[in-house]
Structures are given as C-alpha cells and as structure tokens.
Amino acid sequence: MSTTHPSLLIRVRDARDVAAWNEFVTVYAPLVHAYLRKRGVQDADAADIAQDVMQSVSTYIGRFDYDPARGAFRGWLYQITRNKLRDWSDKRKRQAIGAGDTQALQALHELPDAQEEEAWNELHAWQLFHWAAEKAKIDFRDQTWNAFWRTSVQHESAKVVGEQLGMTAGAVHVAKCRVLARIKELLADVEP
Amino acid sequence: MDESRCPDDASLGELLRSSELQRADNSLESHVGECRRCQARLEELAGASSVQAAQHARDAFASSSASPFLDQAMRRLIEPSAGMTPGPSATVRQPRLERYEVLGVIGAGGMGAVFRGRDPRLKRNVAIKTLRVADDRDTGMAERFLREAEAIASIRSDFVVSVYDLGIERGVPFLVMELVAGGSLAEQIERDGRLSFPRLLKLAAEVTSALVAAHAMGVIHRDVKPRNVLYDAEADRYKLTDFGLVKFQDRPSMTATGAMAGTPEYMSPEQAEGKPLDARSDLFSLGGLLYAACTGASPFQAESAVASIMRVCRDSPRPLDQVERPVPSWFARLVTSLLEKDPARRPGSAADVLRLLELQTAPALSPKSLAPRARRALVAGTVLLAGSSLAAWKFWPTNAATTATPAPIASPTPDVAEPGAFRLGDGQQRFISLKEAVDAAATGEVIEIHGDGPFACLPIALGDKSLTIRAADGSRPVLVFTPLDPKDAQPAIGGAAKLSLAGLEIRWMTPARNAPTAGFDVAVPSALHISGELELMHCIVTVAQRNTCLRWSGSRCVVSHSRLTAPQGVALAWRPKAAAKLEISDSELIADSCLSVAIDASQFAANVCDVTLTSNTFSGDRMLRLRGAGGPKYRLAVAVEHNRFDVQHLLVMDWTQRGPRGLERPGGQELRNRLPRFVSWREKENLYAAQGKFVSHESLALRLAGIEGAPTDIATWEKLWGNTATGSIHGDVPETERDRFGANTRPCLKTRF
C-alpha cells in the first residue's frame, strides 16, 4: 500500500476530485445494481435506487469513518443500499395498497440477514475483481489478457488456451499471473 | 521435475514484472509451463489467492452486465470533465440548500418562494420551491409536507412537473423540481388573450392526463389553475405543477375587512364550502381552467375573493358554444359538465374525460373494425353523447363505444388497443368494449380478450346470462372497472347464472371506504357479485380499501391459481344456500378477512356445504369468519391441505346466542360444544402463523382476551376436531420447508384456458 498515493476511498471525499468520483461510480454502481436485481427489483427501479445510493454516498462519504479494517467500506455501503431498498419497498407497498395495485404488493424476495450479507459480500468481491480485470486490459496485449481471462475466470486449461492463442503453456501461466498481479495492485488502490 | 532447475523467487518476480515487449526467457517460460510447483509459486507471488476468491461469486452476478438503465444512471452520476479541475464553483460560495446551489428567484407567493437553482452533482438546472411553514410550533407540518411531496414525486407523467428531490434545511422544507422554461398558462393567456381550438384541445388532453396520473397515485391536486400549468417550450408540452400543496399554505390571511387573500376563482364549490373533497374537485377546477383558456377569463371572475366564491357556488357560466368565439358543442358540453356544482353530476373521473377527448380527437379508427352502432356514429361524425342535456353525462358511456384507453394508469399517449379486443365466437364479431361484447353475447358463449389493455370497463350486469370471459392466448388483459356513480352499489360484474373467468386481471376502482365491514352490506361494492356458479382461474382481482373482492351466494365456486386482494376488506363474502361447494386452490388471498361466511339459518336446511382449500396462502387478520345467529343446524365441511395461514385469527366466530343472561357472546362452552357440530375440519399439512390464534371471536374484547379453552397449539387444535397426526405446523419453518405450504404458482400467463 502506497502512502504517497491515497486510495480511491480517501480521494473520493474531496468534492473537487472529479476523476476519483467517476472511478468510484464505475466500481460501485454496478455492485449496488446487481445486488438489487438479485433481491428481485426490476432493472429500471434498480438503476434508480442505485443512483440514489451513489448520491447518498457522495453526500455522506465525508462522514464515513475511514477505518483501515478490511471490509469496513463494504459494510457501510451495504447498509446504505439496504436502507434505500427498504425505503423504496415500503413506499411501494404504501402506494400499492393505496392504488390497489396487485403486482406491487408481491413481497420482494427476502433472505435471512446472514445470507443477505453473504450475497452482498460475494457480489462485492466479484464486482471489484471484474472492474479491476476490465481496467487492467489497457496494460496488456489482448492475447495476454485473454489468456488470463480464459484460464482464471473461465477455467479452461492452460494447454488448450495456449494452443488456441498460439502461446506455450508456460507463457499462459505467466500471462495469467501478470494480469492477476496488476489486478491486485488496482484493488489495493480502491479498498486497501 | 528436477527441482534444482526451479527458478528462485527473484526470477519469477522478474517474469511478472517484465514488459510485454521484452522477449520472455523461453527456457524459464517452458519450465513454468511444466512445473506445478513454480506455477503455484508464481500465482502466490501475484497475489492470486485473495483475488481468486472473488471468482466464486461470478454466478451470483447474473445478468447485471447489460443493463441500459444502469448505464443511464451511471452516465447521470459521472461528471464529464475528468481530471482534477477545481472550477469556480469550488471556490465561490453559492447560497445552498443541501447540495443545491441557489441562483436566483423565480417567484414568491403565499406558499413560499420558487428559486432557480442548480444541482452540481447531476449538472442540471432545477427549480427549488421552499415552503413557508406557517407556524413555527407546527413541527408536524414539515413532516407532512415531505410525505405529501413523496406521493407527488411518485407521480409519473410527461405532463407533470417532475419532482427530483426534497429535503429540509433548518426547518424549512423544500422541493427540487424540474425547471420548466416557458412560463405559465396564466401568462400565456394574459399575453395572447385566448388559445386556439387545437391548442385548447392539446391543453385539455395534457392537463387531464396529468390528473389521471395524479389521481392514480391518490393525490388530489386541489389547486388546478392557469398559474399552475407551466408550458415547456422545449418539448411543447403543458405541465401541471404544485400538487396538493395548497393544504400547506398559510391559512388564508384575512385582511382588515375580512376579505380573503388570493382569488379562489378555480376552487370547486365543495372546496369553497370546506366540505370533504375527492378527485372530482380537480375536475371542476379543470373546467374553470379550460373555460379561461377559451375565453381569456375564468368563468367566476369577480372583484373580490368573496364575490368569486359566491359565483362559484351559485352561477352557471355561459356555455362555451354561446360565447363570442364559440367552440364545438361537444367541447362546450364537456366544460359545462365539469363545472357542475354537484360532483356526482360531473364526469366520474379524469380518465373518463381523457377518454372522451381522445375519442373526439382520435384519427381514423378503421370504421370497419368497430361494432355497427359505433361505426355509424363515428362515420356520421356525431358526438357519441346521448342527447345534449347534462343528464347525458350519466349515460353517455353506455351508448358510446369506448376505446380501449388506459385509465387510470398514467400514460400520456394511450395505447390504442387493436380495434376489437373483445371477440365473440370465433373472433368473427369484434367489439371495442366489454359491455358491447357482453350485450351481444348469448348465454353460454365465450368472450375472448386480445391484448393486455389496460381496458377501461363499465360495470356489467349479466342477469341470467351465463358467460365465459377469458384471455386470448398470450394476452394478459387488465380490466379496470370504474363505477358510473361512486355512490352506486353495483358490482363490476354481477350475475345470477354461471360466470367463468380465466386469465384476467380485474381492478375495481371504487372509492376507499372508511368503515369496516363484514362484507355483506350491500352498500359495499364488491368486484364480482354472483349468485350462480363462479369460476375464477388464473385471475387477479383487486379492490379498493375495505371493499370486497367476491360476493357469492350460489351453488358452486371454484377459484384456482388466482389472487384476491382486498386491503382491509373481505376477499370472499359467502352466503351459502343449499348444498354449495367452494374450492380454492393454488391461490393467494390477501385481505382483512379472507373468507367471510354468513349463514342464515332460516334459509339453510340441514345440508352440508363443502369447502376445499388446497395449497393456498391466506394473509391478513382473519381467515374464516363465521356469521350466524341462533342455533345453527348446518355443517360446513372444511378440508384443508398444504395451505399457509399467515393470519392473526384463523377461525373467528361472529355470533351471539340466547343465554341465561340474554344475548351472549360464545365462550369456551360454545367452542367445545357447538363449533365442532357445525363445522367439521379435516386437514393435512398446513402451516399456521406463529403468533396466530386458532379460534377467536369477532368481538374485540374476546379477540384480545382470548376464549377460555381455545386451542393454543397443534395438539389441542387437532383434538378439537378429532384429528390426529395431521402433519400441520404451528410456528416458523425453515426456508427449505416453506415451499410445501401455500400457493407456489403466481397467476401466470397460461397459453390456453
């Protein structure tokens, strides 16, 4: 972890750092959206709520106690998302009852708390990985990145991938690890 | 593998860091290709372990990737100028309300002020309306305002000024809204005198659409007037604003002479008199607005507020086809009917008004596809109003062909359903309204509905006609029934013979009621009132607050794969006659009382009525409410299997009997002796809510206190009925077990009924 270069979570507190905010949105908005979709919210509504969540974060990030403990931000964002979801769901229920709208009365898919948070954590892990993997693309040749993606994520064998991409099995392994190393660097910059 | 040839960490590290352009050391590379140990070590150095954990979640991510809505949302969040450029807004302090910058004043009125502002996050200009809270001590006012504002913000219509955000700053509530450039209708009228007829029609359609959307969300505007209609020059649209906020205005300040501030020329008579309002009050104001747009002045203009009010309550303004620049008679009649003093004589809803406007302005509906009567009328260009008297308003829809427009769903450009959505026989005969199809059908015929609608429908009286009404393959029609006269107790569909419904969604839009009901009061409108046979399959029936979904007193009723929703009301009110059969399966009933059964001993011989409930979910306060008086000598044979009872009180006794001290409410004695004699309960594997009571009495005192000796768990419950080992559960079950109980299938899009 570099001490000279502050992480994204720190930079985002500065309202003037537009680049940090944009990056932040790219990382976390899809996560919130995916979680909401998983909870049964329709696409358009999920996007709306996700936007709400991001705006909330932008307002309150200053108050977020930056505790280097791992998972602190993840948990904080989770709480905000859950609250927004609950508010939205309550409002819809009220509206539904008032307007006699049957479909809206269908309860959203409720999971017990522990499972929910687990689902969130999983989605978080994947989204961060996925974001970093996409970002890492710039730093590598297509061939290298594809070798990484196919072995690491699609779990194809190094031999097969190597044959198809015109690389030796060894080169595939090296490619995979180089991209993974870069991903690790990128992630360290986001949530140390 | 010869381990002595394995490279050290430093060399492996080099591999990781080497640039793409450098030629890789081939021997090193091929070694790694073969050597598992080095592969593992290399991965370790890359920090792969922590990263690989993420991949397990991949499946969880589903299809969130390609979402246009998410993309749009992200675009709105991301600011275009990347890079750290502290602009002037960062250093100059603008007055702010939360994150919004306040740039200028647009106007100030009795209610507060409207500012021009800017949202720096989303980079857009906005209008900010602050509410001047009348009384500092009225802390509830701001909260109520915000709640109302939430309802307003939920109104979605192209013709309503959008509310983006709301908040409180130092006790002052404010609304952040769409900034509409183009001025208000009031300004337009002042400037241009009056609107041309085409523009007048456009105004009428757009403001009415706005009201349809608002009323659908339960919001009454209360202050429809030209000043509250803004003109969006960019989109060439009229937009209604300032909903429902009149309530929060300062109490009209009285001047020294007792005159009221502000001119209430557009107020409805019931508003002026301080009577309770409903949505039709907005219609009156709409009439005034259209009148003003047409003639340049409100119909009740006067010198003082008090004089205006008197005119509102007493005067009948000159019809618009008799003024200097007259408009077509049909429009004049519309405005006159909107301006009726008695709300009951006005059009029933904004949706009705919109329908009429659309009918009059709709381009060619292919005349061939309409039913003969409507075709003739349309071709002749005559107004589809029976007669010109105001009384016609009550009757016009029955004589007219109603197009299938969505009502009261908010939709600025209504979907015009394919003409002839309601088809009889083999589709040879097509009608554009349900009523026409029903009138034309003979007993026993089948009406098929094509398209999803929503279709605005009038109440249907079947009489002795048996009918089947079903959705066509692939269609999932929504039928929105509105009563002609809200005081009328006619059901949406009533009949005495056999009615079979399949694949329909029925919404019965009556006013919400305030008084609770057991569901038998004929004054409580039910959606379906059938005294013959009823079949409901894959249907959804929704009613307004405290109303009833089904009222049935016939011989057979089958409900399957359906959902009945009666918020704080009754799902099925049943007055059994002879040996009747009730079957409910795979359905969901959500109501205050799911089944309310009234047994009239004098009508009832010693027959048995069978009730079979299989795999349903019952949610609400009471499941089965038994009403009757005196000594019942009948039986309800109830067989329940695999149901889920999410109710507070399962069986509710609602009768009194003569006891030594006069009329008494039954207690433990009655429970043990009488109940099992008139109800027999056989069950298998049901799930009862953890906090629910098995047997209660309708009287609140007994419901709270409980009946002495009433069963409290499965064992005593089974004992009451003489059952054993039913497999039912009282309490919570693990998630995995839940599927066994209740309705699992939502009413779905079946292909054929």
Image: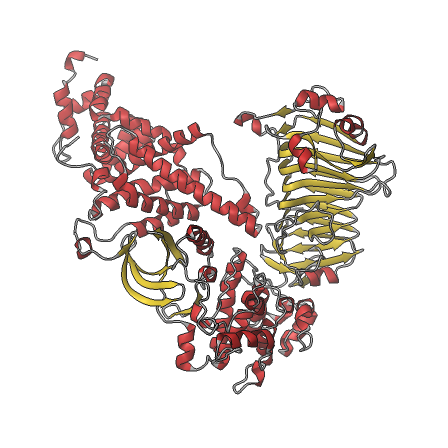
Q: Write the residue at 51% across / 69% down.
A: B205
Which residue lies most toward the bottom here? Answer: B324
Q: Foreground residue, A90 or A1? A: A90
Q: Is residue B505 visible?
A: yes
Closer to us: B258 or B671: B258
Q: Is B580 on the left-hand or right-hand side of B136? A: right
Q: Is residue B10 above or below residue B98?
A: above
Q: How is the image coloured?
A: secondary structure
Quick one: quadrant of the N terminus of chain B? top left
**Quadrant in the picture for residue B431:** bottom right
Q: Is residue B311 above or below residue B159?
A: below
As drawn, B435 above or below B740: below
The image position of residue B134, as x and y in percent, is 41, 59
Identity of the residue drawn at 59% across and 25% down: B731
| Residue located farthest toward the front when viewing the structure as drawn | B256
Q: Nearer the viewer, residue B341 or B723?
A: B341
